[in-house]
Amino acid sequence: MEKHVNQVEISTLINFNREMHTAFKSFVFALKDKWINQDVVTKFENNMKAAGKKLTVKKYDADHGFSNPSNAIYDKTATEDAYKNALEFFKAKLK
C-alpha cells in the first residue's frame, strides 16, 4: 500500500506543478519519511528535470512532521533551517 500512496502523492505533485508552472521549485524532504521516501523524491526530481523545471531539494535527517512542535519527533534545528529557506524562497519569488 505504501508504494501506491507514494505514486499517488508524486503524481499529485507533478500534476500540480504542470498546472501552476512555477510551483515546487523548492522541495523539503525528511530522510526518515516512510511515505515520501528517497525513491519518490528521486522520481520527482527526474520528472521535474524532464519537464525542464529547476528544482532545489533540501534534505533533512528528520522524520515526517519534523516541524510540528507538538509532535514527539519535532526537530528544532531542521525546522529553523527549513523555515529560513522557505522565507528566502518566498521573498525571492513574491516581489
Image (cartoon, rainbow, N blue to C red):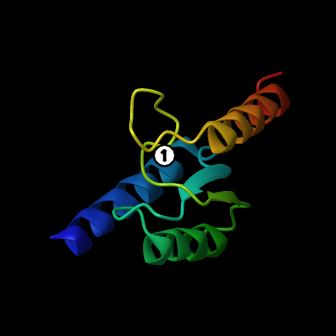
Q: Which quadrant of the structure image shows residue 45?
A: bottom right
Residue 57 at x, y percent in the picture? 67, 60
Q: Residue at x 74, y 61 (%)?
A: 54
User: Considering the numbered disc 1 on the image, is that residue within a helix, a strand or a loop?
Assistant: helix
User: Furthest residue to the front?
Assistant: 72
Q: Quadrant of the C terminus?
A: top right
Q: Nearer the viewer, residue 61 or 41?
A: 61
- Front one among 19 and 42: 42
Q: Locate residue 29, reporting x and y percent.
A: 56, 57
Dot 1: few (<14), some (14–19), or many (≥20) neighbours within 10 Å? Answer: few
* Vertical order, 27 against 80 (above or below): below
Question: Is residue 41 placed above or below 81 in the rendered structure?
Answer: below
Instruction: State the residue at coordinates (70%, 34%).
Output: 80
* 49, above or below 81, in the image: below
Residue at horizontal 69 percent and vertical 67 percent from the top: 52
Residue furthest top in the image:
95
For badge 1, the amino acid type reads: Glu
For disc 1, the marked residue is: 19
The residue lying at 76 percent from left, 24 percent from top is 94
How many numbered markers are drawn?
A: 1
Position above or below: 94 against 15: above
Q: Position of residue 78 (x, y in %)?
A: 65, 44
Which of 93/63 is in front?
63
In-image side of 12 versus 22 (left or right): left
Q: Which corner quadrant of the image does residue 59 belong to?
A: bottom right
- Counting from the top left corner in percent of width and height, residue 1 is at 15, 70
